[in-house]
């Protein structure tokens, strides 16, 4: 899942832990656990087939899309960090020059798809042209998940071609100084030439929670491969700081202070700047083969908090969705305003909850496909149900004129002044787009995001329910229809609610690393990168599960 990138900058104020302790829920928040039916096999339209095989024709179509995207990039912009398919040109993240962002993010997809000649050319570029000696600012988190993560997966999938590990070590050594803060939280940016962490201009100590807590899989796997414990400790320390800053309901505001290690007064949400914190709690536990109990506990506490605080049901047809919480100072404490807004990014959580239910909340070592109710604890069933229902909602948000989902959807609520009974029988709407003639808002875009197909892939692997393949295929066809650029590449669209939408001249690298990879894997058989042997980082780079000799720093 791609995280976390937000356009909105929050004005943030540090608050003490005691202040954060005084939670007042604003609005009408009936906090109670939903009682839902066991969903795994109850769905009346389930199409179960657990001995499924690869669907070769669909995989070939997805590989053709990858080639259409990659060959245009290679033709127009090879080596540049980003690609603009309409202008037929590339760009770099920093004026100091490229860091292999696009090439490295895409290379493991080539390995998985068996695109040998593309792979050989990309590898040659990495071996001969790539350098990280760039005197500019690069985002610590994005560089870790896309570049470090991409190199590590390529290393594993190439049967340990040393060029990838050498590059990964060089990059990580340039990044480690970003963790040299008083608290141990990393700074949000890093100068790879000077080997220095760099703060934001408007607040030198600010780091988003997701950015600080979505580096651990990469640095820990690198530590495992190199036997260098420093990578491990730096990444792990961050988790200790977050745990120590713990706030009462087990949820995390989206900003922290890298100097003090405290949370700052900021929103709580499962979307941008929050999302992959929740994702990596589970994945850290899985990466070391379920041996570090501390992450399981943090994960379970946090999922319980999500159930009791953030889950709501739509007013028209009862779709399950999650809300955001916005803090305000109120009579010496904090008051939280609830907002029925869900980022597309949140759709990662559907698959993550289903995976967590079978790996962390089960009575048996290996749960059946699909899971039996008797194999999961009550909490496991609750997690599974919530994941299942959130995925239904995410799929429903693709039921738009273009067949694609908006970057942000809002849900109708009582008293919002909207005529929600009139609106297409849906629970959701896209803000700014509901009146004809208004300019497309950022909310209405589809920027080739992967989170829903990622959850479809996981849900299919865990159930063998062919409905999930059908939905994924529909999404792929909508991408073909609305995002494909004839001369090569794929572009974002500005308005999913308009079939004549304009395109935006950008092909995000996560389209190659995540969206097309997860679509391809949705149609592969279960032996390809099995979920009990691999953990996908938040940019869809798979790492093999391993046993670690490093003792946890905290419990
Ligand atoms: C990106 O950086 C590379 C390496 O310095 C350079 O060769 C290329 O021209 C740059 N691309 C653009 C569009 O500036
Ligand atoms: C993970 O642990 C299980 C036992 O719980 C074991 O069977 C399996 O081989 C381990 N996997 C790895 C990669 O060590």
Image: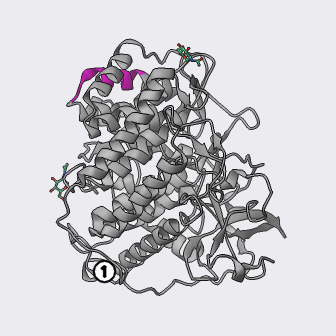
The colour scheme used to paint the residues is one colour
Label 1: which residue? 41
* Residue sitting at the far right: 331
Image quadrant in which you'd find residue 29 = bottom right
Residue appearing at x 47%, y 71% in the figure: 392
Q: Nearer the viewer, residue 21 or 171?
A: 171
Q: Nearer the viewer, residue 341 or 517?
A: 517
The prevailing secondary structure element of the residues shown in magenta is: helix
Q: In the image, 469: left or right of 192?
A: left
Q: Secondary structure at mark 1?
A: loop
Position in image of residue 341 (x %, y %): 66, 65
Give the residues in magenta: 160-170
* Residue sitting at the far top: 128
Label 1 CB, ligand 2: below 8 Å? no
- Is 168 a magenta residue? yes
Residue appearing at x 24%, y 56% in the figure: 532
Image quadrant of ligand 2 equals bottom left
- Is 432 a magenta residue? no
Q: Nearer the viewer, residue 325 or 101?
A: 101
Position in image of residue 433 (x %, y %): 73, 60
426 over 141 or under it: above or below: below
Residue appearing at x 37%, y 12% in the figure: 128
Q: In the image, 502: left or right of 332?
A: left
Position in image of residue 342 (x %, y %): 61, 63
Q: Tell me the quarter of the image containing the C terminus.
A: bottom left
128 over 210 or under it: above or below: above
Q: In the image, 514: left or right of 495?
A: left
Position in image of residue 77 (x %, y %): 51, 22
* Residue 232 visible here: no
* Residue 468 visible here: yes
Q: In the image, 289: left or right of 81?
A: left
């Amino acid at each position: 899942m791609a995280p976390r990138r937000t356009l909105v900058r929050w004005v943030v104020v540090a608050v003490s832990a005691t202040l954060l302790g005084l939670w007042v829920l604003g609005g009408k928040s009936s906090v109670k656990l939903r009682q839902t039916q066991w969903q795994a096999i109850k769905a009346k339209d389930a199409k179960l087939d657990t001995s499924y095989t690869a669907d070769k024709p669909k995989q070939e179509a997805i590989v053709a899309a990858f080639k259409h995207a990659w060959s245009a990039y290679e033709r127009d912009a090879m080596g540049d960090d980003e690609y603009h398919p309409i202008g037929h040109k590339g760009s770099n993240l920093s004026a100091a020059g490229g860091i292999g962002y696009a090439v490295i993010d895409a290379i493991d997809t080539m390995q998985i798809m068996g695109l040998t000649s593309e792979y050989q050319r990309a590898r040659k570029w990495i071996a001969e042209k790539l350098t990280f000696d760039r005197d500019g600012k690069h985002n610590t988190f994005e560089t870790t998940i896309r570049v470090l993560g991409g190199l590590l997966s390529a290393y594993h999938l190439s049967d340990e071609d040393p060029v990838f590990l050498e590059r990964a070590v060089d990059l990580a050594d340039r990044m480690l100084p970003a963790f040299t803060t008083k608290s141990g939280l990393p700074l949000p940016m890093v100068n790879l030439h000077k080997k220095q962490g760099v703060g934001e201009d408007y607040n030198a100590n600010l780091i988003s929670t997701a950015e600080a807590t979505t580096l651990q899989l990469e640095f820990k796997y690198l530590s495992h491969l190199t036997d260098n414990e420093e990578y491990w400790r730096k990444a792990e320390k961050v988790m200790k700081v977050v745990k120590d800053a713990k706030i009462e309901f087990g949820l995390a505001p989206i900003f922290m202070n890298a100097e003090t290690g405290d949370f700052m007064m900021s929103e709580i949400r499962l979307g941008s700047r929050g999302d992959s914190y929740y994702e990596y709690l589970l994945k850290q536990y899985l990466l070391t083969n379920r041996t570090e109990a501390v992450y399981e506990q943090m994960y379970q506490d946090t999922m319980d908090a999500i159930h009791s605080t953030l889950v709501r049901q739509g007013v028209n047809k009862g779709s399950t969705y999650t809300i955001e919480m916005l803090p305000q100072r109120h009579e010496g404490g904090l008051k939280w305003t609830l907002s029925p807004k869900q980022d597309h990014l949140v759709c990662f959580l559907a698959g993550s909850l289903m995976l967590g239910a079978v790996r962390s909340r089960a009575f048996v070592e290996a749960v059946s496909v699909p899971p039996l109710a008797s194999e999961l604890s009550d909490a496991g069933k609750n997690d599974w149900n919530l994941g299942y229902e959130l995925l239904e909602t995410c799929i429903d948000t693709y039921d738009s004129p273009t067949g694609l989902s908006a970057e942000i959807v809002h849900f109708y609520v009582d008293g919002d002044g909207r005529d929600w009974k009139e609106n297409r029988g849906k629970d959701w709407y896209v803000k700014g787009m509901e009146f004809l003639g208004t300019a497309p808002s950022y909310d209405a875009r589809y920027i080739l995001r992967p989170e829903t197909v990622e959850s479809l892939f996981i849900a299919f692997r865990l159930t063998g329910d062919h409905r999930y393949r059908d939905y994924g295929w529909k999404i792929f066809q909508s991408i073909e229809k609305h995002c494909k650029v004839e001369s090569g590449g794929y572009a974002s669209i500005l308005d999913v609610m308009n079939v004549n939408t304009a395109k935006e001249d950008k092909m995000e690298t996560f389209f190659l690393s995540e969206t097309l990879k997860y679509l391809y894997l949705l149609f592969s058989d279960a032996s390809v990168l099995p979920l009990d042997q691999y953990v996908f980082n938040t940019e869809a780079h798979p790492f093999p599960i391993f046993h670690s000799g490093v003792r946890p720093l905290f419990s």
